[in-house]
Amino acid sequence: MLATAPDAVTSPEPIDLVISHDAAGRASELLARHPLAGRKILIVVENLPVPFDRRVWQEATTLRQAGASVSVICPKGEGYEADYEEIDGVHVYRHSLPLDAQGALGYLFEYGAALFHEFRLALKVARRQGFDTLHACNPPDLLFLLAIPFRLFGVRYIFDHHDINPELYEAKMKKRGFFWHLIVLLERLNFAAAHVVISTNESYRRIAIERGRKRANNIFVVRSGPNISKLRPTEPDGALRNGRRYLVGYVGVMGEQEGIDLLLESVRHIVYDLGRTDIQFCLVGGGTSIDELKKLSNILGVSDYVTFTGRAPDDLLFRVLSTADICVNPDRVNAMNDKSTMNKILEYMAFSKPIVQFDVTEGRFSAQDSSLYAKPNDPADFAGKIIELLADPAQRTWRGALGRERVVQALSWDYEIPKLISAYQQAALR
């Protein structure tokens, strides 16, 4: 039973934060039976390298533990430049990408190059390891083009739905038009080609049914639950506070739709309108907008209060999460973010951190009472919620404990393993 917030803000009773023995035991027992023995799986992901992509890596290693032979095709990235390596029994093939796409022609060039390399490497995997199931993770929704030729030879196609691209396009471009309609068509074709769909939450499951026209028995919700055994708190690092009393942490991508500009506006409000100069903000992550965001922090006069680490190794990530007094998710309220589950929220919760975020459907489902919810896209209210939590240590403690307990008792990766295995068993029947 999940803990509930007290009527008054007081120190909570200690909560047993050991992961549910039932969930961990069931997952271990299931994997020990090797239910996917003899299966040969190829996972394709285009937007992040592996094992940096935590969700894809958890899926790959879980499938390997279930007895399958697993290969992964992914792009190269900083720290992940090897063309091929075997990690924990998983065969990882990587390819270069020409650029970070900007504009229609840029995306066409990038996606075309990626498809070429993916098909080339898929043929290599077919010769070396073989595969009977192709598990493709969007974005983009073009990977059905890779799946179709192999379907002719009996390969099963599983579509792992990571992003809702029509909503993502609209959030970035602030319009619809020709390319939006094209993206909707590609999404529909991707769903149609799939034998089984893996959805990351119930909102995505509804999209698979309503827009993708998939039957409910061919859709499996597999959330990106954190592997608690690998998210280990460290000793707090006082240097991250930059000489200030409090540290507010952010972990995630630095892109247009992540709302970091709204967070920086909140920092400006905190420093100049509220006169609080005792709070440091540490933002962990890389992305296409990081240089623009650094410039914006200078324009707003808050660069001394904001640390941009760029893409960081786990050691630094864990130190930031272990040191932070609270963590934030400034994803702006739009159709995409309302329906998407953000991995950072679950990571904050795993580290027992109270959260401030804007009020979106899936963010509230994940965090529940471990978070405060600001008015949609309102930097001043977001700043006010940050100040409220920092002023109340007892509230921070019990909200952080609620988040940790929810991950442990309902949202960790152990709960998702049986669902992932079931998706593969269903694909074999199609």
Image: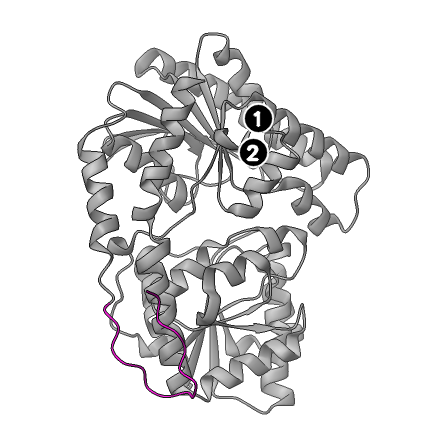
315 and 351: which is toward the camera? 351
Q: Residue at x 56, y 72 (%)?
A: 373
Q: Nearer the viewer, residue 114 or 67?
A: 67
Looking at the picture, which amino acid does disc 1 mark? Ala
What range of the chain is rendered magenta? 1-16
- Disc 2 or 1, which lies upstream in sequence? 2
Image vertical order of residue 293 relative to residue 372, above or below: above
Amino acid type for the residue under numbered disc 2: Pro
Residue density around tag 1, few if under 14, some if 14–19, many if 20 or more, within 10 Å: some
**Residue underneath mark 2:** 98
Q: In the rendered structure, find residue 308 and report the number of the disc placed on it.
A: none
CB atoms at circles 2 and 1 under 8 Å apart?
yes
Furthest residue toward front: 1
**Residue 3 located within the stretch drawn in magenta:** yes
Q: Is label 2 or label 1 in front?
A: 1
93 to the left or right of 384:
left
Camera-side residue: 424 or 280?
Answer: 424
Residue drawn at the location 40% of the way across and 75% of the way down: 399
Percent across and percent down for residue 153 are 45, 7
Q: Main secondary structure of the magenta part?
A: loop
Q: Identify the residue under disc 1.
A: 113
- Residue placed most toward the observer, 100 or 133: 133
Quadrant in the picture for residue 348? bottom left
What x and y, as percent, mark residue 151?
Answer: 49, 13
